């Protein structure tokens, strides 16, 4: 519950301005500058909005100094250990953990919507065979509004609910179809008797000539990846979804915008960049060279998968992901793979070397998730689509919260203009 209990005083140009302060349920107090421009004729300047709260939200809370991540108040490690992805989806969407009947009903609704419109196959065929799966996902998810236009009215609560369920159910199918299309294999239809993660693995790795039986350990690891990436407060892609939604855009367009933003290597592409770095290092005897390069401030090389912009001590998701990585590698019997040996040696150094400890460059969730996905057989091009699949429920939850917020208005950031002052037009012959 946000409370307004005190105010901050701003002295500017000889005038005092009282700015109300809001106290959240957890976290630092916030100065409300909503009326600052009207009253003082000034803006604030905050590149990247790193010190600005753009909205009020009750979904996810992060304390970077403590290494804490809460979904609706529940610690992420507890949810990853004791829950499963669809239960977490329910929590993010509706605010509370479901009862058994509520969970059964929710899982059934999702399961009944996993198939996509058959005409969407024609849409896939319009992409080049070598198209990146993320390029396909941006286009296909955006095009869902053309196939499911009966659930695009954002002012209709029932349509918002239907579109939410449809996206949670169909994005795994779309991601799997994008993967199959990129490798020239036939699409695999979803199966209603499988759980969410197992169904996705089967759609990716099954072929008509041979059935794929998902291994429980792999399915559990996949489920954890989904859970750990389900939401992460007001990150770049979530802010993009909210900004697109603030204009009244339909939900499919908003989620497509989020997917496009996630595609950036500084955001959703981190686990892919991490694995590519491991392949660049190539062998154990080259690790000292790259460690020295990472310590050299004049060298542009950076160790990917270490440290985090938000978490200053450790990434709470990394511990859970490391457990899954160990289980998967043991199951598949590839602990001695050289790339994985490089990863383990880098992990050891990061946890013991004074430079990394001082700089707080600990292994993060992207470091371990990339290793798991590679071990499962996914190409690096599928890492970000799987991230998008995981984050879809978070985007939808944030979008629904924004739509229901009575104080929400269309996003319109201001700017600090540095261009030319007003000048007269010069005719072409006089330039």
Image (cartoon, rainbow, N blue to C red):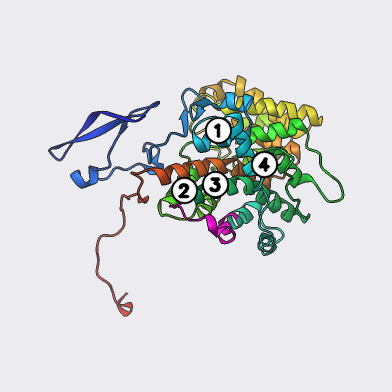
Give the class, few, some or many, for how many residues have Cα within 10 Å of label 1's Cα (few <14, many ≥20).
Answer: few
Magenta: predominant secondary structure element? helix
Give the residue at x 12% y 38%: 14
Picture coordinates of residue 382 (x, y %)? 67, 46
Q: Which mark is residue 157?
A: 2
Q: Which residues are magenta?
A: 141-157
Is label 3 in a helix, a strand or a loop? helix
Give the alpha-carbon distance from disc 2 to disc 1, as whole Å: 55 Å
Give the alpha-carbon distance from disc 4 to disc 3, as whole Å: 34 Å
Upstream in sequence: badge 4 or badge 2:
2
| Tag 4 and tag 2, C-beta contact below 8 Å | no
Above or below — where is 179 with respect to 5? below
Query: Circle 4 is placed at which residue position?
Result: 276
Picture coordinates of residue 2 (x, y %)? 34, 30
| Tag 1 and tag 3, C-beta contact below 8 Å | no
Query: Circle 1 is placed at which residue position?
Result: 296
Give the residue at x 63% y 43%: 110
Q: Which mark is residue 164?
A: 3
Picture coordinates of residue 4 (x, y %)? 28, 30
Is label 2 in a helix, a strand or a loop? helix
Q: Quadrant of the N terminus?
A: top left
Is label 4 in a helix, a strand or a loop? helix
């Amino acid at each position: 519950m946000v409370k307004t209990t005190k105010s901050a005083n701003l002295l500017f140009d000889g005038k005092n301005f009282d700015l109300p302060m809001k106290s959240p349920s957890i976290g630092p107090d916030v100065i409300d500058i909503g009326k600052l421009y009207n009253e003082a004729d000034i803006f604030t300047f905050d590149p990247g909005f790193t010190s600005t709260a753009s909205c009020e939200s009750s979904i996810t809370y992060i304390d970077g100094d403590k290494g804490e991540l809460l979904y609706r108040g529940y610690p992420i490690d507890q949810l990853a250990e004791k829950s499963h992805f669809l239960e977490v989806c329910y929590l993010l969407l509706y605010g509370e953990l479901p009862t058994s009947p509520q969970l059964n009903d929710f899982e059934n609704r999702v399961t009944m919507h996993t198939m996509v419109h058959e005409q969407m196959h024609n849409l896939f065929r319009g992409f080049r065979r070598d198209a990146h799966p993320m390029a396909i996902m941006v286009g296909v998810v955006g095009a869902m509004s053309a196939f499911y236009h009966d659930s695009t009215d954002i002012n209709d609560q029932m349509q918002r609910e239907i579109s939410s369920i449809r996206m949670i159910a169909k994005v795994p199918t779309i991601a799997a179809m994008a993967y199959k299309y990129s490798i020239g294999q036939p699409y695999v239809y979803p199966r209603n008797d499988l759980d969410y993660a197992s169904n996705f693995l089967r759609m990716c790795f099954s072929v008509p000539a041979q059935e794929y039986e998902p291994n429980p350990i792999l399915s559990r690891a996949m489920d954890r990846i989904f859970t750990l990436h389900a939401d992460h407060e007001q990150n770049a892609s979530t802010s993009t979804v909210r900004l697109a939604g603030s204009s009244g855009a339909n939900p499919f367009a908003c989620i497509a915008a989020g997917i496009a933003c996630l595609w950036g290597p500084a955001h959703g592409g981190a686990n892919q960049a991490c694995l590519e770095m491991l392949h660049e290092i190539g062998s154990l005897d080259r690790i000292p060279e790259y460690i020295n390069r990472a310590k050299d401030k004049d060298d542009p090389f950076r160790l990917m998968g270490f440290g985090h912009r938000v978490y200053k001590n450790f990434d709470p998701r990394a511990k859970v992901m490391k457990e899954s990585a160990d289980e998967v590698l043991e199951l598949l019997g590839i602990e001695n793979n050289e790339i994985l040996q490089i990863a383990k040696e880098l992990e050891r150094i990061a946890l013991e070397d004074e430079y990394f400890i001082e700089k707080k460059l600990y292994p993060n969730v992207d470091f371990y998730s990339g290793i798991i996905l590679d071990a499962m057989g996914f190409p690096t091009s599928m890492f970000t689509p799987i991230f998008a699949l995981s984050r879809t429920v978070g985007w939808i939850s944030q979008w629904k919260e924004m739509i229901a917020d009575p104080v929400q208005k269309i996003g319109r950031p201001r700017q600090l203009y540095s261009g030319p002052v007003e000048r007269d037009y010069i005719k072409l012959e006089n330039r």
